Image: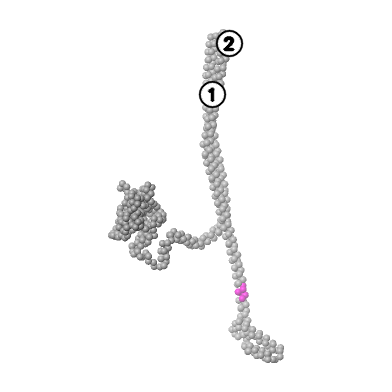
Amino acid sequence: MYELSRVRLYSVGPEPARYQDITLDFSDVGRPVRFQADTLLEPYQPHRRPSPASVLFLENGGGKSVLLKLIFSVMLPKRRQIVGTTSTRVLENFVLAGDVAHVVLEWMHAETGRLLLTGKVSEWRNNTVSGDPENLATFWYCLRPTEEVRLDTLPFAADRRLVSRVAFRQRLAEGFASDPRLEFFASRQPGEWTRQLDQLGLDPELFRYQREMNADEGEAAGTFTFATDEAFVEFLLRAVVAEEDPREIADLVAQHSRDLARRDGLLLESEFVAGALDRLVPLAEAHKAARTAEATAVGAQAAIDQFAQSVAARSRAERELLAVRERFARETAEALAAARTDEQHRQAAVKELRRRALVLQLNAARAIEAVAKQDHEDADALAESWREIEKAAELRAADAAATETAALVKDAEESVRPILDAKKAAAAQLARGLLQVAGEAADAAKKVGKLATECSAAAAAAEDALVRETQEAATFSAGAAAAAKRIAEIDTMLSDAAASGLLPAGSSAAAAAELAAEAAAEAGCRLTVAGEKPSISTRNASCRCAPRTMRRPR
């Protein structure tokens, strides 16, 4: 179990109750630590526990409530868990423009004396106070103090300037990288920070009870006083059950209630849609045909555009090739003219050489004809060789020009090929998209047709049931009319019998039936007596019949 040892507040709080750099020290005044933790790895450890109870005296407005809110904001990170209020924007008022607010709590383990720091850093984005609480950037962190990093040496400022929230976290992370004993952890998520506190042994649920006890600065006993059994059950569930599980169930129940509330409207909407679908089927078919025609037209237009682009590209390529060939023809003509001029010059030189040779041969030695003929043949061979050299030069120049022309043609084809490939890929992608849209429309039409068929069948069944009920009602009405007519006839017969003196006046149908049965029995007795001799039995029968005769009306 951890106990609060020291609290440091730095550049935090509203203007009336500002904490610029305050340290509240409750350490080294309690009972001795049971198990001392002074080791080579952790030499800095107090030897006594913090104060078990402390009293802070401040005048009204001095910052007592602000202090509690700041301390509890480290252990209860959610905005709705602020002490003493239900507002979720109180903490935003504690961070001013340009502030990098720090709230750091130093804890000591009651048995081992090991220290733990938990802190919170808040800073407005762009150092500008905003009405949006999301612009207040906050993260929570924890670490184990060492000789270099303690509550007193945390890098809140450097060169008389506040260290930004990001730079502060980066410095602690670098310190943890160089010294793993720090056990540094940081998080921007309240849920993740709550789980980290639970793993460290700082149960946030205890601080939630403390928050409830300090909600209105009244007695702590009021927190555990429950007016009803439901209040106690709710308190017990909040303490045992995680908050996320009931919220999910509540969301499901709320969604189900919303669905039930919308049921009548949805049924009416379903009937309306069913009737509308019956009338919209022709429109849908016409729309489908129009879409098909439009798709066909778009495809044809795309094909025409592609063909026109290919024709334009081919035209450009042909024009470029024509320009290259015309340039090659001009160069070839110029080369041919130069070659012919050179040939004429060479022929003139050859002739001049021949003339000079002949003059020299003639002047030198006419006598040696054989030698002169030999010299003449040598000169002829030399001239022939010069002529062959000219032809070879012409062939070489023509070959070089053909090679250059082929290279130019190949470069033109390579420059045009990516454009053609891109156009082909775009056309293929457009065709696939159109096919997909057509398939989805067909599926939707099938579903709508199926729903219309089901609704038509249900309407036919309801109409048959209505016809049957109408026929049964007509049958019951006819039977009731016949029964009423028979009752009227019986009443008429009773009236006639009463008028003739056979029945008492006002006799009902049941009384008339009873009198008729007695008269029939008396008549039977008389017939029996008339057919037999008088005897005791007949006399007795006559006696038995006599009372019945006496009951007959006169």
Does the stretch in magenta take in 287? no
Image mark count: 2
In this rendering, is residue 42 above or below 258? above
Residue annotated with mark 2: 370
Q: Residues within 10 Å of mark 1 (few under 14, many from 20)?
A: few
Q: CA distance from mark 1 to mark 2?
A: 35 Å
Pick whichever, 265 or 506, lies toward us.
265
Locate residue 480 relative to residue 71 in the image: left or right: right
What colour scheme has been applied to the protein in the rendered image?
one colour
Residue 428, percent across and down? 55, 44
Pick whichever, 305 or 531, lies toward us.
531
Residue 403, percent across and down? 54, 30
Q: Residue at x 35, y 56 (%)?
A: 35
Residue 429 placement: quadrant: top right
Q: Label 2 sits on what residue type?
A: Ala
Q: Residue at x 32, y 54 (%)?
A: 46
Query: Residue 393 has which mark?
Result: 1
Q: In the picture, which quadrant includes the C terminus?
A: bottom right
Please identify, in this view, whether the residue under mark 1 or under mark 2 is nearer the observer.
Answer: 2
Q: Label 1 sits on what residue type?
A: Ala
Locate residue 241 relative to residue 432 in the image: left or right: left
In contact (CB < 8 Å): disc 1 and disc 2 = no
Q: Residue at x 38, y 47 (%)?
A: 177
Pick whichever, 454 or 255, lies toward us.
255
Residue 464, percent across and down? 60, 65
Pick whichever, 58 or 27, lies toward us.
27
**Numbered range of the magenta stretch:** 478-483
Q: Residue furthest top?
A: 367
Residue 228, percent across and down? 40, 68
